[in-house]
Each structure stands twice: as C-alpha cells, then as structure tokens.
Amino acid sequence: MKVIQKNITLKPKTRGFHLVTSEIISEVSEIKDISKGIMHILIQHTSASLSINENADPTVREDMETYFRRIVPEDSSLYQHNYEGLDDMTSHIKSVLLGSSISIPITNGRLNFGTWQGIYLCEHRNHGGNRRIVVTIIGE
Amino acid sequence: MKVIQKNITLKPKTRGFHLVTSEIISEVSEIKDISKGIMHILIQHTSASLSINENADPTVREDMETYFRRIVPEDSSLYQHNYEGLDDMTSHIKSVLLGSSISIPITNGRLNFGTWQGIYLCEHRNHGGNRRIVVTIIGE
Amino acid sequence: MKVIQKNITLKPKTRGFHLVTSEIISEVSEIKDISKGIMHILIQHTSASLSINENADPTVREDMETYFRRIVPEDSSLYQHNYEGLDDMTSHIKSVLLGSSISIPITNGRLNFGTWQGIYLCEHRNHGGNRRIVVTIIGE
C-alpha cells in the first residue's frame, strides 16, 4: 500500500468550465505505478469547484456556465456577502452545489474513467487566478 | 490493508431515481471481510448519477425526479448541446449537480449507513441502457 | 498504513449552515499521527448535509440558507412526501444537492484545507436534533 500526495497549482482560467484532466495527470506520473486504488483531489478554494463530466464537446462546458449563471443569478438584492463583487457569493453557492473534491478509481496505472469522462475545473470568479489542488493517491 | 476493485454493470432502469443498494452489495461479497474501511463507487457515465438518500418511501424518489425536471427544464432554447434530444444536456447538468461518485464507510463487514440511507442510481436519460460502475474498497 | 474510524454525535443545530470543523477535529485527535492520508466523513441522515466552504464571514452561511430556501421552495403543491411537514421533502432534496459525505486530505498531522475552508453541517430540518457522523481516516 502506498500513499502519494502532491500539491499542484493550476494555471489561471477564464470564468467557466474547463477540462483539466491532462494538466493534472501530467503532474502525477505516479499513477502508472498503482494497479488498484483511488485518486482524491481537493481544490483549496471556496469560489471554484471540481467536477466530472463530458470530455469532448465544448458546448457542454458552455451550456454548464450558462445554466449555473441562470440558477445562481448575480442579483445584489439576493445576497449580503457581495464585498468582492456580484460574483462573490454566487461563487460560494456554485462551489457547494458542484463540490470541492472528486475521487476517481485507478486501475492498472490509469484513471478508470468512462470513455466520455474528464475532470472539470469550474471557475466561478471573473478573475480567479491560480488555483491550488491537493492530489492524494491511496492504492497498491 | 486490502484494495478490492470490481467492475459491475447495473441493469437498465427507467428514467428517474432508483434504490440500488442490494443490486450493488450482492456483487461485492468482499465487504464482509472488511472491519474498517471505505467503499467508493464511480459511475462511468456523464448522464446518470449516484447519490445517497431515503431508502423507504417511493414517493421520495418520485419527488426527486419531479424536482430535477423542474430545476433543469427540457427547453431547447436554453442549451446548445441537444444532439441526442432534449434529455441530453439536461442529463449532463443533473450529473454535475448530483455527482458521479459516492463513498460510504464500511464497519464490521457492513456498509455503515444510517437507518434510512440507501444508494440511488439517478437515471437522467429517457433510455439510458446498462450503466457501468467501478467499486473500490480500501480497508482492513 | 492505518485505518481509524469513529462515530461522533454532533450537537443539535438550528436550521441553516454551521461551521463544525472544530467540533469534529476535537473528537479525532488521531489526525495528528497521520503524515499523508484522507479523512472521510459520512452524515448518517437524509435530511442534513456536509459540505466545505467559507470559514470566516457568517453572512456566507446566512446567504446559503436563503439561497437553498429559494431554490427548493416549501410549497406543498410541489411534493407528495410531506408527512413530517413542509421541511420534509425539501430536506431530502437539499441533501442530494449538497451531499452526504466529504473527503479532505491530511498532511503532516493536519487537515490540508485552503486558508478559507471549513466543514459545514447543513441542517435542513426545522428541528433536526442530534446528527451522527462516521469519520474514517486512511493514511500513514
């Protein structure tokens, strides 16, 4: 049994949903030494999220951003916590709806995703900057 | 410490929320050999979800389907990604809202759920077909 | 490698979002003996949730409660499952939106959170009472 842990900084992204599977995997070459296990990732921020979804068509990620803008409207009358702008409280809400961490099985040295699955960084702030994640792998 | 991993195919379900605790546990008899650990399950699809909720009253699952149909409306003017029908993009959105994986503690050879908890397969497509999951158990 | 597992009862909370990081950590002193690992927490109820979000400004937690009251309205015409009151089915829905479990990396004897992250108990019932959680730590 091994535990591998890494801190990774993801490059700044524009607001919206971004595929980051390759950006993350390229930093965790140790995956290839794991035959059976789990990879856990936490994003160390409360205004951006991690999720798993469709990895091919960019319009899926665009529709996601459109949907979450609609379901969490940037209307100042709805929130008290707008110190950093109208994208402040809305980002916290999107963060709890989408989640701060994901877990993915590792099998025979690879993430055991379905064909169409990838890792999303969901950037809810207009100018989020670098985003730090902690990757923890437990397996054998 | 042990790592146990299994690929399981869940039988096709009608659109909606379904209790699948028994269907899954019957395929993972190894749980009974674990005194302390975690069971992780990933669904390898982007248009169906896994969740944990009430295991007794069927109207809870019906109300869930009603709620998610309302909060993610099948209105073609809202989405670009409708190639496979009006239940296409809506299924991706429900998938990120509900999540692709769950983790449950194992204690003394059993899932350590509360009295009223069970595993939901949330089928968002009108005709989803078989659904593949990967079960990973880590424990001792 | 170690597996540590504990059952903890959280004191009753008023309806809303509550920071419980300290209340939980004070019961799991074993964290300090883990150099690399993961802490998983399941709440054994279907009408309260666990989440991770902003740990400083109380208005964030107030805005969360306001948002979820709005997005999951207590309108009896929308739900069949209202046996225990208008906060019954709405609590189940909030539970699947927010999630029943969280996982956090442990590094050098501490939860490896970002500066502004804490653990939320999200109490969706008007009178939820005690809430039981199961904490499982896997690491070395």
Image (cartoon, coloured by chain):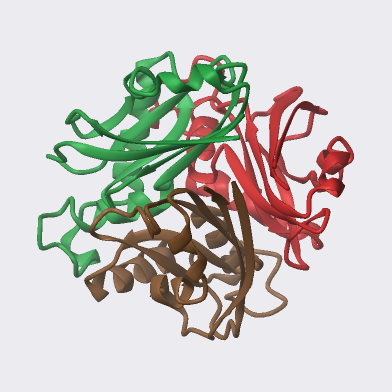
Chain colours: A brown, B green, C red
What is the quadrant of residue A85 in the picture?
Answer: bottom right
Instruction: Answer with left or right where residue C62 lies relative to residue C80.
Output: right
State the image coordinates of residue B17 (x, y, percent, origin top left). Answer: 31, 30
- Tell which of C82 and B19 is nearer to you: B19
Res B117 visible: no
Q: Is residue A64 visible?
A: yes
Q: Name the residue: 64% across, 62% down.
A: A5
- Locate residue B18, reporting x and y percent: 31, 26
* Left-right relation of C140 to B68: right
Instruction: Using the image as rendered, state which of residue A91 and residue A86 is in the foreground.
Output: A91
**Above or below, comparing residue B137 to residue C33 in the picture:** above
**Residue sitting at x 31%, y 74%:** A62
Considering the image in quadrants, where does the N terminus of chain C appear?
top right
Quarter occupied by residue A136: bottom right
- State the image quarter where residue A70 is shown: bottom left
> How far from the left and from the top, in percent, is residue B69?
29, 43
Asked if B72 appears above or below C54 in the picture, the reply is above
Left or right of B23? Residue C99 is: right
- Give x and y (percent) for residue B23: 31, 20
